[in-house]
Image (spheres, coloured by chain):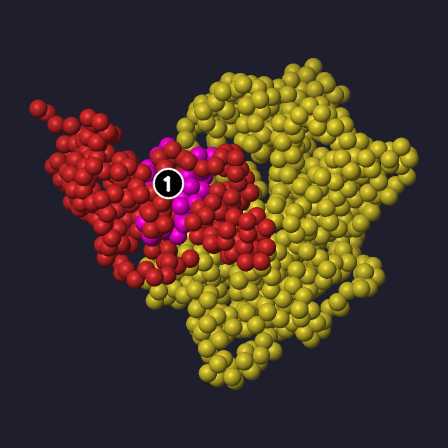
Chain colours: A red, B yellow
């Protein structure tokens, strides 16, 4: 699986920029005037205490929430708001804080579902499963098998997702997102609820995805050790405001960040 | 001393004859590319599909690989390591190196780096051909101890992109270099053919390091003749031909896998199938429908455990049906398989059972098409053995050793007994010394231990007999060899009763709830056992019986688990009591260990045999407590995690007493006490 054709961006180019975005739900201001950017090929983390607006930020990026102010520039096109299908077609995939898979379907079918947008034959062709539709399905299956191999889950290929332990479900969800061959992969707490070994595995996979497929990754994560190890750059939110932005070591030594996390004596 | 010799019982019919001019494995490959040409030689399930290579394709791959290795500097007499799971390209690596006259040294892929360091340094390997990043990392972490190594070749490029590639190359690169070399200089192919032709049957073919139940591993040197003739005789013994299908899933470093997945395939021309992942072996075996199988008892035990656990979760009707027909099979199945006289109604009942239970079960196990299945490497529990025979699977016992290129004795079809290991294989002579040790002599007998003439002299007599280290005797009734135990493990209780620890352990290990047992008793007053529960079986039992637990340790210490294990031990005592000689060696006390015995902690060998002496030392406080009458003991042990880090587990382990079952001997002892 290579980066999709027509993508002439180089590593380090600006992939996505969020400018002065504000988002409010009634009186609750989830994001206030936040700006940050994501460069092609990096692993970008968004961190912050509970309720800081991290998931809201991801939802704005993939068009689930529409901000009242500000603009989003993705692959050079600036929009006041992103719509979900634009995000998906434009190559943004995501995983969720709580696993959102089709529990009754097998691992294989779940990941195949991730390729829906890449299927070109119409519904009736697919129903017939003949000729070009069959050829297309075979090609999609090959790519899905590639992902199954990559994530080391061939042994559970045909097992319904609902029967799997949580750590594996998270991996399947990552697989489904990868099946979209995204340019930008949003991971919402990929390691929540995992034990140490599962976390190490997942970290490995995130680095490998970035390395092997060249996918740009934006992730939210609470485990600071993981974030500091994985990320190239980190943006820190607190109460909907951006309080820091920089490399792991810059962020770690930032006074505002320390106060946000540890609290401060008044 | 009488010597039993394996006859060549006219088994050669329908076999590829032992090719006189193809006396090395690379030569056999060239022969196979001619005579088996477009037949499948090896398959690998990759991306969900079985990918196959014909013998011709394998030859071409091996030639490119081999010339590429020559470009990297591998030459006659060099040793090179092969580390990884069963992958076609790792098998090709062995042949590619052998073609140049270099010697492959396969290692256990799950060994930690420190264990590898010893073998790699001892064998002075020049190259390491490995599966993936995990193995590359291990070698890089110990590279300052490896002075001879000049390069690492890997199969799976994943995760290795950012590594320094000065001494690192992929198998693709190496094969590419080989192909380029041939393209720019066609004489390179002729040169390669000359290299192959220069090989002799008497040349060193492979060094297999034995996992060693005691001390450091020893490098067993086997020649092409050793491996090839032994493999050929094995094929002849069971009339195996090019139509067999086998699945390769055992460690490359085990002699069993080398004979079975490499040598016998090259000799007979049958196809070897490499599974997709270790977890998918059962499923993959089912898809292939293997006809010939070779496995240590542990694999068969696991199949039974899995089945029993699943049956416990099945509905009442299914469960009844299962138990009813299993009882039928136990009563009549073996007799039918051995073609004995059986009443008509039993035959009919067995048929129905085959339709409803045995057939589906065999299909699940992937053993529907099996012609010959061997268990080897360790004694199998008689109950486990009979279970498979009763289902109509031709499971046989084999007695082998790395030093013999596997084959010493095997059971001929139609002469199967649960407690023997059969008759000497073709061309093998076997005798038993006066102290009960088994000696053997055969064309498969090893050249010696690598760089250890002292050990070689201890094991191998000047006239070619090898001391097996096992105690046994020829059964006068059947003429079969029976193994009691390792010669040095058979002991006596203080009152002089014969104590064969493995015999007792195997009886207990049949219970699905028990994974591993260590029996103690030599030079002591009574037999005591340390039990390791099986997490799958006991976990499922706990779920059904509302036993709540948070960890392995907590489950192992649960009183209800102790009760259950206690009942199993009482049953074993009853069966020991019924056996006369063993009646006084009944189990008096037991404990359940708080952690799983693990090869990473040195408690099991890499082939998963318990290392009794090591365990006795490591759990010394428990041992003392077993014999001083305490009800409980504290123990703290260091454990090694999968990634090599170390930690400590401490626990208080309780000890239970068991009343011996009434038998003549036991009753007398009770009275005396």
Q: Which chain carries label 1?
A: A
Q: Residues within 10 Å of mark 1 (few under 14, many from 20)?
A: many
Image location (x, y in percent) of residue B368: 72, 46
A87, A145: nearer the viewer: A87
Image location (x, y in percent) of residue B67: 50, 74
- Please tell me in which quadrant of the rendered image residue B124 appears: bottom left
- The question of residue A182 being in magenta is answered with yes
Image location (x, y in percent) of residue B286: 65, 47
Residue occupying the point 26% across, 46% down: A44
Height in image: A2 above or below A148?
Answer: below
Q: Is mark 1 on a helix, strand or loop?
A: strand
Residue occupying the point 54% across, 18% down: B546
Judged left or right of residue B74, residue B137 is left
The span shown in magenta is A165-193
Q: Name the residue under label 1.
A: A95
B144, A214: nearer the viewer: A214
Residue occupying the point 56% across, 55% down: A134
Q: Is residue B159 visible?
A: yes
Q: Can residue B253 be seen in this view?
A: no
Image location (x, y in percent) of residue A53: 23, 34
Judged left or right of residue B242, residue B278 is left
- The question of residue B448 being in magenta is answered with no
A46, B463: nearer the viewer: A46
Q: Residue furthest left?
A: A266
Judged left or right of residue A230, residue A195 is right
Residue occupying the point 22% across, 44% down: A80
- Please tell me in which quadrant of the rendered image residue A14 appears: bottom left
Height in image: A29 above or below B544?
Answer: below
- Quadrant location of the C terminus of chain B? top right
């Amino acid at each position: 699986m290579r980066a999709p054709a027509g993508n002439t961006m180089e590593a380090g180019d600006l992939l996505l920029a969020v400018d002065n975005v504000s988002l409010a739900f009634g009186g609750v201001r989830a994001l206030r005037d936040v700006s940050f950017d994501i460069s092609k090929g990096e692993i970008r983390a968004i961190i912050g205490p509970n309720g800081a607006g991290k998931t809201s930020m991801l939802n704005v990026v993939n068009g689930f929430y529409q901000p009242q102010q500000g603009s989003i520039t993705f692959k050079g096109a600036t929009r006041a708001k992103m719509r979900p299908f634009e995000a998906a077609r434009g190559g943004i995939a995501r995983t969720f804080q709580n696993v959102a898979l089709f529990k009754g379907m097998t691992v294989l079918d779940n990941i195949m579902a991730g390729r829906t947008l890449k299927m070109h034959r119409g519904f009736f062709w697919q129903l017939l499963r003949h000729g070009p539709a069959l050829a297309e399905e075979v090609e999609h299956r090959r790519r899905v098998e590639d992902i199954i191999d990559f994530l080391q889950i061939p042994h559970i290929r045909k097992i319904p997702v609902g029967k799997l332990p949580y750590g594996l479900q998270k991996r399947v969800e990552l697989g489904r997102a990868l099946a979209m061959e995204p340019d930008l992969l949003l991971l919402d707490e990929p390691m929540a609820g995992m034990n140490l070994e599962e976390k190490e595995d997942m970290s490995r996979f995130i680095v490998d995805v970035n390395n092997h497929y060249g996918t740009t990754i934006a992730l939210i994560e609470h485990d600071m050790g993981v974030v500091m190890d994985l990320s190239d750059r980190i943006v820190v939110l607190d109460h909907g405001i951006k309080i820091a932005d920089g490399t792991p070591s810059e962020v770690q030594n930032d006074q505002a960040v320390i106060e946000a996390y540890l609290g401060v004596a008044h | 001393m009488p010597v039993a010799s394996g006859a060549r019982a006219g088994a050669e019919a329908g076999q590829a004859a032992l090719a006189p001019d193809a006396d090395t494995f690379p030569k056999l490959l060239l022969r196979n590319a001619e005579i088996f040409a477009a037949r499948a030689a090896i398959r690998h399930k990759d991306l969900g599909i079985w990918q196959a290579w014909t013998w011709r394709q394998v030859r071409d791959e091996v030639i490119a690989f081999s010339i590429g290795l020559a470009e990297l500097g591998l030459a006659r007499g060099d040793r090179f390591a092969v580390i990884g799971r069963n992958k076609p390209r790792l098998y090709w690596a062995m042949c590619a190196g052998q073609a140049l006259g270099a010697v492959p040294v396969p290692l256990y892929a799950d060994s930690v780096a420190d264990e590898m360091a010893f073998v790699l340094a001892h064998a002075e390997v020049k190259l390491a051909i490995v599966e993936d990043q995990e193995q590359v990392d291990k070698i890089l972490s110990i590279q300052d101890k490896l002075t001879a190594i000049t390069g690492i070749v890997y199969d799976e490029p994943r995760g290795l992109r950012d590594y320094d590639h000065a001494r690192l190359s992929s198998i693709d690169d190496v094969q590419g270099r080989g192909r380029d070399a041939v393209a720019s200089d066609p004489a390179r192919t002729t040169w390669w053919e000359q290299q192959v032709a220069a090989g002799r049957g008497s040349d060193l073919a492979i060094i297999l390091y034995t996992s060693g139940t005691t001390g450091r591993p020893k490098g067993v040197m086997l020649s092409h003749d050793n491996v090839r003739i032994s493999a050929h005789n094995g094929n002849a013994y069971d009339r195996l031909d090019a139509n067999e299908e086998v699945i390769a899933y055992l460690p490359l470093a085990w002699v069993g896998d080398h004979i079975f997945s490499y040598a016998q395939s090259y000799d007979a021309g049958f196809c070897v199938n490499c599974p997709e992942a270790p977890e998918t072996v059962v499923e993959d075996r089912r898809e292939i429908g293997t006809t010939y199988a070779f496995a240590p008892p542990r694999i068969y035990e696991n199949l039974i455990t899995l089945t029993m656990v699943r049956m416990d979760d099945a509905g009442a009707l299914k469960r009844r049906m299962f138990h009813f027909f299993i009882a039928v099979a136990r009563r009549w199945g073996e007799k039918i398989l051995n073609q004995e006289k059986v009443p008509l109604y039993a035959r009919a009942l067995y048929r129905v059972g085959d339709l409803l239970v045995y057939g589906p079960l065999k299909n699940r196990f992937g053993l529907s098409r099996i012609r010959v299945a061997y268990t080897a490497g360790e004694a199998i529990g008689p109950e486990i053995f009979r279970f498979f025979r009763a289902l109509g699977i031709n499971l046989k016992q084999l007695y082998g050793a790395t030093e013999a290129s596997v084959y010493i004795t095997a059971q001929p079809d139609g002469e199967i007994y649960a407690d023997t290991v059969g008759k000497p294989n073709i061309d093998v002579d076997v005798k038993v010394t006066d102290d009960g040790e088994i000696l053997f002599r055969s064309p498969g007998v090893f050249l010696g231990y690598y760089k250890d003439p002292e050990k070689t002299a201890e094991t191998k007599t000047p006239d070619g007999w090898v001391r097996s280290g096992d105690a046994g005797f020829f059964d006068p009734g059947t003429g079969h060899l029976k193994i009691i135990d390792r010669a040095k493990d058979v002991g006596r209780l203080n009152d002089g009763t014969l104590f064969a620890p493995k015999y007792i352990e195997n009886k207990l290990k049949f219970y699905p709830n028990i994974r591993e047992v260590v029996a103690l008793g030599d030079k002591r007053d009574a037999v005591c056992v340390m039990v390791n529960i099986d997490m799958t079986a006991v976990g499922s039992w706990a779920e059904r019986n509302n036993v709540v637990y948070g960890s392995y340790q907590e489950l192992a210490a649960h009183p209800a688990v102790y009760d259950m294990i206690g009942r199993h031990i009482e049953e074993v005592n009853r069966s020991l009591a019924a056996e006369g000689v063993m009646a006084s060696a009944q189990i008096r006390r037991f404990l359940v260990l708080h952690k799983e015995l693990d090869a990473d902690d040195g408690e099991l060998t890499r082939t998963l045999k318990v290392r009794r002496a090591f365990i006795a030392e490591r759990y010394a406080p428990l041992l003392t407590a077993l014999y001083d009458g305490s009800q409980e003991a504290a123990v703290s042990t260091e454990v090694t995690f999968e990634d090599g880090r170390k930690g400590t587990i401490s626990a208080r382990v309780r000890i239970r007493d068991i009343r011996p079952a009434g038998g003549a001997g036991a009753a007398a002892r009770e009275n005396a006490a």
